[in-house]
Image (spheres, rainbow, N blue to C red):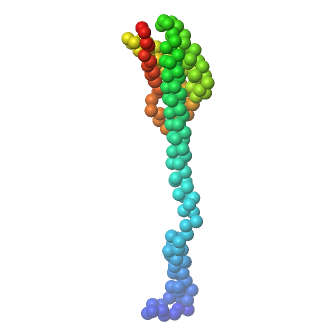
């Protein structure tokens, strides 16, 4: 059986409303889609969380690097001050080594095996140079952020009176 709708003849089972109803429902769902924001938080977290984790790891890594640099500078300062009591180069070097063994071992942040010590006399000034190899340190071996350098070098100078 056919029926005339709007000037066109359609079979009874194929009315335009029945054909277009699923399409209209899909369009209605698409129009309502921006109103559903339940998963937006999950998507934002998935995008922002890795960035925040990298930022946090960078802060921790750089904090450790600055702590190691500060500990190394303090150890150099203590060693240079201790060297003032020495009468000759050999005794000064022994005082420096003793002071460094005490300060570096008690700092807890530096590996004593990775610290290189250089001392020298320049006129009336005695110089203690400490170099720490960061590339071999376990503390920085798994760093996800690049470090400022492979070594940390710190210098302390004291004036020797009466030489």
Residue at x-position 54% and y-position 62%: 40
Residue at x-position 51% and y-position 79%: 24
Asked where in the image residue 140 lies, by quadrant, the reply is top right
Q: 69 or 62: nearer the eye?
A: 69
- Whole-percent x and y of residue 117? 50, 16
- Whole-percent x and y of residue 72? 51, 25
Residue 81 shows in the view: yes
- Whole-percent x and y of residue 59? 52, 41
Residue at x-position 42% and y-position 9%: 162
Which residue sits furthest front? 162
Residue at x-position 55% and y-position 51%: 49
Quadrant (top left, top right, bottom left, bottom right) of the C terminus = top left
Asked where in the image residue 124 lies, by quadrant, the reply is top left
Q: Count all numbered tags in the image, as a single digit.
A: 0
Q: 159 or 13: nearer the eye?
A: 159
- Whole-percent x and y of residue 99? 56, 17
Quadrant (top left, top right, bottom left, bottom right) of the N terminus = bottom right
Above or below, comparing residue 93 to residue 4 in the picture: above
Above or below, comparing residue 110 to residue 41 in the picture: above
Q: Is residue 131 left or right of residue 102?
A: left
Residue 26 shows in the view: no
Q: 153 or 87: nearer the eye?
A: 87
């Amino acid at each position: 059986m056919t029926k005339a709708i709007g000037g066109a003849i359609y079979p009874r089972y194929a009315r335009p409303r029945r054909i277009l109803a699923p399409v209209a429902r899909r369009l209605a769902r698409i129009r309502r889609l921006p109103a559903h924001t339940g998963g937006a938080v999950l998507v934002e977290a998935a995008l922002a969380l890795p960035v925040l984790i990298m930022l946090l790891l960078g802060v921790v890594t750089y904090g450790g690097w600055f702590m190691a640099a500060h500990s190394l500078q303090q150890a150099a300062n203590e060693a240079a001050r201790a060297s003032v009591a020495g009468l000759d180069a050999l005794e000064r070097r022994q005082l420096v080594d003793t002071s460094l063994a005490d300060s570096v071992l008690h700092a807890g942040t530096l590996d004593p095996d990775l610290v290189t010590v250089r001392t020298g006399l320049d006129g009336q000034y005695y110089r203690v140079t400490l170099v720490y190899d960061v590339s071999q340190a376990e503390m920085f071996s798994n760093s996800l952020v690049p470090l400022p350098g492979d070594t940390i070098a710190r210098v302390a100078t004291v004036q020797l009176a009466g030489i």
